[in-house]
Image (cartoon, grey):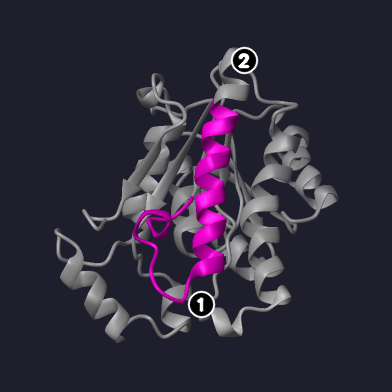
Amino acid sequence: MSKLTGKVAVVTGASKGIGAAIAKALAAQGASVVVNYASSRAGADKVVADITAAGGKAVAVGGDVSRAADAQGIVETAIETYGKLDILVNNSGVYEFAPIEEITEEHFHKQFNVNVLGVLLTTQAAVKHLGEGGSIVNVSSVVSRITPPNSAVYTATKGAVDSITGVLAKDLGPRKIRVNSVNPGMVETEGTHAAGVMGSDLETWAISTTPLGRIGQPDDIADVVTFLASDDSRWLTGESLIASGGLR
């Protein structure tokens, strides 16, 4: 039997990139998956189609995690469709880089609303339904450790996610709900291609400073999330697992 057979999972920001890989990995291990998207319905439908074609179960649902009503609706879709919720993966995130001279209120709030408030609102909605053995996985970033230049706001959001992970692990531990984060290094996704990272000096630097000598792939992160979602990690909570090929 697969390690997530009978489980129900919500994955936010799952229409592409790391989120899509996570949704597919959880489904491959037997979970029924709610694939959330903010703007790309076509992308989410493709993920659902891939999962069902492989024999899994999935449904797509739109919603902006930075809005309480949307966060509630995403979680309610799991309950209405599958009758329960066991796993929440807070993957939705945005990033913009700017030197201190160019930081604006819009730049700040855009990232904090999705990356931090979104984690809190979606978790708030989910904990009403998560029971003993539930697992929450927050997708953070290695930037909270390596603090790259021109990333003050983005790095601050991921530092906040790491802190929230620790707090919620203590808050929800008595209810036997685990909370962990996975902190990826640079990963090749549609987003990093669109941002011009692939083939840039930044990619060259990342490869040169990564002991395993390559950029991460979405499946590298998805497998770590699957571990944290499953009972294989039953004795882990409040942890931040750095999945960066050794980049520190």
Which quadrant holds residue 133?
Answer: top right
What residue is at 35 percent from the left and 65 percent from the top? Answer: 187
Q: Amino acid at mark 1?
A: Phe
- Whole-angstrom CA distance, mark 2 to mark 1, is 38 Å
Instruction: Tell me, yes or no, whether the highlighted magenta stretch contains residue 198.
Output: no
**From where the camera sits, is residue 9 visible?**
yes
Query: Residue 67, image x and y in percent?
Result: 80, 55
Label 2: how many Cα within 10 Å (few below 14, some 14–19, many 20+):
some
Query: What residue is rendered at 15% in x and 59% in y?
Result: 212
Q: Is residue 30 above or below residue 188?
A: above
- Front residue of 113/76: it is 113
Asked if residue 21 is positioned above or below residue 106 in the image, the reply reads above
The kind of residue tagged 2 is Arg
Q: Dot 1 surroundings within 10 Å: few (below 14), some, or many (20 or more)? A: some
Position of residue 233 in the picture relative to residue 22 (left or right) = left
Q: Give the magenta range.
A: 140-169
Q: Which residue is mark 2?
A: 175
- Circle number at residue 77: none
Where is 218 relative to 40, above or below?
above
Visible residue check, residue 1:
no
Q: Which residue is mark 1?
A: 97
Quarter of the figure that contains the C terminus: bottom left
The residue under the point 38% across, 69% down is 148
Q: Is residue 167 magenta?
A: yes
- 215 and 40: which is toward the camera: 215
**Most common SS among magenta residues:** helix
Q: Dot 2 lies on which element?
A: helix
Placement of the N terminus among the 4 image quadrants: top left
Q: Secondary structure at mark 1?
A: loop
Measuring from the top left, give residue 218's x and y in whole percent: 37, 59
N-terminal of the pair, mark 2 or mark 1, is 1
